[in-house]
Amino acid sequence: MKKSLDSQMLIWSNRIIHDLKLDLRQANSLGTTVENEVGALTDQQKQELINSNPVSPQNRLDELVAFQGWMDFARNVRSNPHVTRAQVITQNYICFVYLGDALFKNLKSFLPPPSVTGRCCRLLINNPIRAFRNAIAHSNWRYKHDFSGLEFWAKKGSAPDEPLVHFEVSQEDLSYWQGLSRCVAYSAYMALAREK
């Protein structure tokens, strides 16, 4: 699975190098690197990370595998707008709300930057992805008129009286964010699921 994740992320190598300040070797082996970094945590750190959530890493991994099955099914159903829209909703929820809350915030505290894992998590939990996650969680999003991406509304910060700000994300950026999210999650959960 590691090599498969690494090869799936190759299309984003240039962005990974730029956004995460990684070298070519790290960018081309992103899944392997994340799994190795999580696997190299001390036994105590791994147990603390596992115990920080009531749902086991294996259960999370099972959900990701089921999610991938849904994605594969939906990709094969062409020209059905109902399936496509359900796919978009599911994918955004899983990649940004579910995984952000279940994994990325805690994982970053155990593997802070400059680790590769910490750099990935920092990107995945900060703006503009943070704002997008909040828009998904609070139903403040819609398709752009030409379906080339999504527009959404979210606060830039956390002040209660802060107004919502309009954002847009292209389909290309969204695909990159989703790919990064899934790569980090699969890699981390594979390493943690081996723990007893």
Image: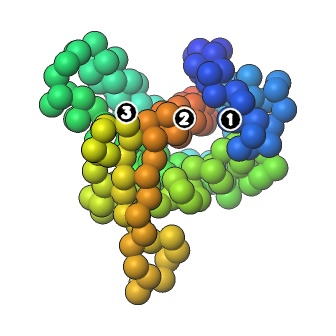
> Which mark, residue 15?
1
Q: Is residue 2 placed above or below 163 in the rendered structure?
A: above
Residue 33 quadrant: top right
Q: Earlier in the sequence, mark 3 or mark 2?
A: 3
Q: Indicate which label's residue lies in the foreground, 3 or 2.
A: 2
What residue is rendered at 72% in x and 30% in y? 14
Residue drawn 35% across and 29% down?
67
| Horizontal relation, residue 112 to residue 57: left or right | right
Location of residue 142 with respect to 184 vertically, above or below = below
Residue 10 figure quarter: top right
Spatial CA span between label 3 and label 1: 28 Å
User: Can you give x and y, in whole percent of width and height, for residue 56 in the image?
Assistant: 46, 42
Please state if 76 lies on the left or on the right of 150 as rendered.
Answer: left
Secondary element under disc 3, as helix, strand or loop, is helix
What is the distance, in whole Å, between disc 1 and disc 2 at their CAs? 8 Å
| 3 and 1 marks in contact (CB < 8 Å) | no
Question: What residue is shown with label 3?
Answer: 63
Badges 1 and 2: C-beta atoms under 8 Å apart? Answer: yes
Q: Which residue is mark 2?
A: 176
Q: Quadrant of the C terminus?
A: top right
Circle 3 crowding by C-alpha within 10 Å: few under 14, some 14–19, many from 20: few
| Whether residue 134 can be seen here | no
Tell me where residue 126 appears, x and y as whole percent: 59, 59
- The local crowd at label 2, few if under 14, some if 14 to 19, many if 20 or more residues have their Cα within 10 Å, is some
Residue type (three-letter) at the residue carrying disc 3: Glu
Q: Quadrant of residue 8?
A: top right
